[in-house]
Image: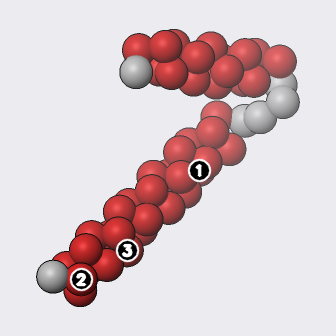
Amino acid sequence: MVTIAVFTAFMVIGRIVSGVHWITDIIGGAILSTGLVMLYYLVCDLEKKEKF
């Protein structure tokens, strides 16, 4: 888990410094991915409840 966090931080800083992305692009991507992960867990949870 720590390795993933370090890699993510390295990529974020590298992309901002190199000018590939603006900070708002990275924040938007984080919000979007968080929402998609939460939606995935919601669907999985609902599917578990329907089976029992």
Mark 1 lies on residue: 28
| In-image side of 32 versus 46 (left or right) | right
Label 1 CA crowd tier, 10 Å (few <14, some 14–19, many 20+): few
User: Image height check: is 29 above or below 17?
Assistant: below
- Tell me the kind of residue under disc 2: Lys
Read off the residue under disc 3.
43
Residue at 55% x, 57% y is: 32
Where is 33 relative to 51, above or below?
above
Q: Looking at the image, which is closer to me, 5 or 29?
A: 5
Give percent across and percent down for residue 36.
Answer: 50, 61
Q: Position of residue 13 (x, y in %)?
A: 65, 17
Residue at image position (84%, 30%) is 20
First in sequence, mark 2 or 3: give its number: 3
Say which residue label 2 marks.
51
Q: Is residue 16 left or right of residue 10?
A: right
Q: Where is 25 relative to 50, above or below?
A: above
- Relative image position of residue 1 (x, y in whole percent): 40, 21
Q: Are marks 2 and 3 in contact (CB under 8 Å)?
A: no
Q: How many marks?
A: 3
N-terminal-most mark, 1 or 2:
1
Quadrant showing the C terminus:
bottom left
Q: Please tell me whether mark 2 sits on a helix, a strand or a loop.
A: helix
Q: Nearer the viewer, residue 7 or 18?
A: 7
Distance from label 2 to label 3 (Cα)? 13 Å
- Give neighbour class at mark 2: few <14, some 14-19, many 20+ (Cα, 10 Å): few
Mark nearest the camera among 1 and 3 is: 3
Using residue 21 as the reference point, say whether residue 24 is left or right of it: left
Q: In this picture, is 23 found above or below 30? A: above
